[in-house]
Image: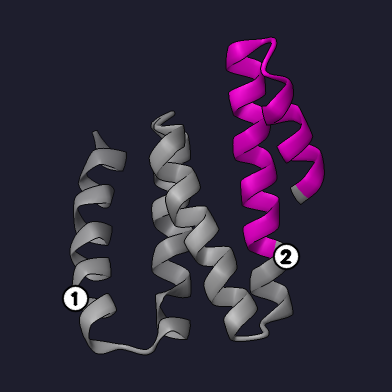
Amino acid sequence: GEYVEALKWFRIDYDISVKHLPGKDLLPTCQSLGEIYLRLENFEEALIYQKKHLQLAEEANDTVEKQRACTQLGRTYHEIFLKSEDDCDAIQSAKKYF
């Protein structure tokens, strides 16, 4: 319940921010959306926002945010692997980001 409610508010924040703020200011929202989608096990959406987080961090040359994004991506691919038990691509992607 609370993740779904948080997701609603972070989506509103993202939709407004993407129209009015520079990309670097989207970093926390993309990170949060990726985390919530991961916890809800919506891996496809999680990866979209986590990859956006990494892209924005690279554009901003923000080492801390790049590390945070890579860790989150690694965790997501690891979860995908655990759920599938045989997704070799997921484990390779997890290794790439960790």
Q: Residue at x 78, y 33 (%)?
A: 92
Looking at the image, which is closer to me, 60 or 1? 60
Residue type highlighted by circle 1: Ile
Looking at the image, which is closer to me, 94 or 29? 94
- The part of the image, by quadrant, that contains residue 65 is bottom right
Above-or-below relation of 81 to 52: above
Q: Secondary structure at mark 1?
A: helix
Let me know if residue 40 is in the magenta part: no
On residue 16, which mark appears?
Answer: 1
The 10 Å Cα crowd at callout 2, few under 14, some 14 to 19, many 20 or more, is some
Above-or-below relation of 43 to 73: above
Q: Residue at x 62, y 60 (%)?
A: 69
- The part of the image, by quadrant, that contains residue 55 is bottom right
Q: Residue 98: x and y, percent?
A: 80, 47
Farthest front residue in view: 89
| Highlighted range, magenta | 68-96
On residue 7, which mark appears?
Answer: none
Above-or-below relation of 95 to 23: above
